Image (spheres, rainbow, N blue to C red):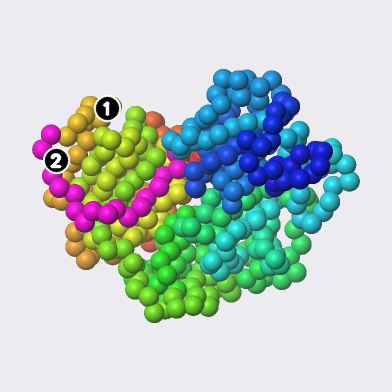
Amino acid sequence: MSDRGTGSGCKRSRPEDWGEIDPSPVVHVRGLPRHSVEFDVVKAFESYGRIRDVTMMPQKKQALVEFEDISSAEALIERNPEVKILNSLVQISFSTSKHIVQRAANRVPTDEQSSLSADNHILLFTIYDTDRPITVETIYRITFSYGSVLRIVIFRKSQVQAMVEFGSVQEARNAKLHLNGADIFPGCCTLKVDYARPARLSVPRNDQDNWDFEKCERDPFCNFQDGHYQNSLLGYMDEGHYDYEHPYRQYPYEDSNDYGHQYPSECKNIPVGPHNIPALNGAQNRNRNSNSTAVVMLYNIDMKKMNCDRVFNILCIYGNVIRVKFLRTKEGSAMVEMGDVESATRLIRNLSGVSFMGNQLMVRTSKQDVILDVSSPFQLPDGSPSFKDYSKDRNNRYTTAIMAKKNRIHPPSRTLHYWNAPPKISNNELLEFVRKCEAPEPQYVFISCFGVHKFYSKFTNYLIRFLWNT
């Protein structure tokens, strides 16, 4: 959506040429940092008043924020001509628009009132810079963690668009908040998310562009993760990923979920995995491991909540952690040396872009090959040192080939798998442990009886599902 004057209708390219703009409940935000999503924008402005709607323009690094009361917008402009989003200054001004207008699904509103965006359980995804194949699986993978996805329809005209029908308005609202403005893959497939107008999606057939999940009887853990293809919003997908062999495949069945169960027969025809996607031009001739270093950079870390040990706990799922070093000169940043290049690649693929402690965690390849020992580390806000060496830590999970095979590599989700619990532990004891960790209370705890090797028969498996993505 472009911000246009109500008079001549001419597009104004430079704010300095606009002249004085009348106050409006809509604020125009410019200079958004890349990977900003609606959640980041709302977080920056919600303290000034109730926000009615947000429109992201990721291709222009801009956004429109409409307050319910014009006085909220006036207070914002008066007090803060510049605001920080993801630690970057953005420019704000009144918009020439008086309302955020919804133009979706090729329908032209007949009057201003009907054109105002309204919350709906169906979202319209507009995808810019589609340099990767977009299928039902791609859309499902980035949306399923926000709620019950009922139907997906993809449109391929001058621009790729998709509609996703959720089970409730709240689920759609949460998905829009966290996905609007994000990249599906690094540097491409940028999302603009709006509420759609239809009350229900019509799915003529199940294929790569259409899918009705209510007609697919599947177990709740059938997430189409067949082991060939691990991918998440903003996760790393190297060009060689379109080769047909996945280097980290660990599952014993071709058509199984992460607990070793066979997928229901109704799900076996879902269009999943790169083996069903044509390779990009020249992709198969490129080196799989385009990264040449095991050192990564972490950005947008909440320094009040994180320290070296907590960084280790998050990253050790994806590979051995050798050293962790927080940077004094770049607040909210840390450098981590992993055990090998493959582990660094797994970090970028699974963690980059996820919502973490209220911020959007960014993981990038470092220019350094190793992290040198720090003789005098500075203190973090919690009093712990800013540097730690974990090369001999027994909690590393990839120290032997046998241990490495036991790891389940997945992007973060609301469901945690917890194993080796004492068989007599109660749900209340487990919930008390979660409270001591100051984590949000789980939505439910599910005791698992499947996938347990006889060697571990004295222990119990648990699934813990949280209501919020944290």
| Point 71% across, 71% down: residue | 205
Q: For mark 2, give the secondary structure.
A: loop
| Point 78% across, 52% down: residue | 198
Stretch in magenta: 359-376
Judge the density around disc 2: few (<14), some (14-19), many (≥20) Cα neighbours within 10 Å: few
Quadrant position of the C terminus in the picture: top left
Mark 2 vs 1, N-terminal side: 2
Marks 2, 1: nearer the viewer: 2
Q: Mark on residue 374?
A: 2
- Of residues 431 and 350, the one nearer the viewer is 350
Q: Where residue 281 appears, x then y in whole percent?
A: 49, 77
| Amino acid on which disc 2 is placed | Val
Circles 2 and 1 in contact, beta carbons < 8 Å: no
Q: Is residue 118 visible?
A: no
Reading the image, the residue beneath label 1 is 382
Q: CA distance from mark 2 to mark 1?
A: 19 Å
| Amino acid on which disc 1 is placed | Asp
Question: Is 111 drawn above or below residue 75 in the view shown?
Answer: below
SS majority, magenta: loop
- Of residues 38 and 76, the one nearer the viewer is 76
280 sits left or right of 291 in the view: right
Q: Is residue 8 visible?
A: yes
447 sits left or right of 381 in the view: right
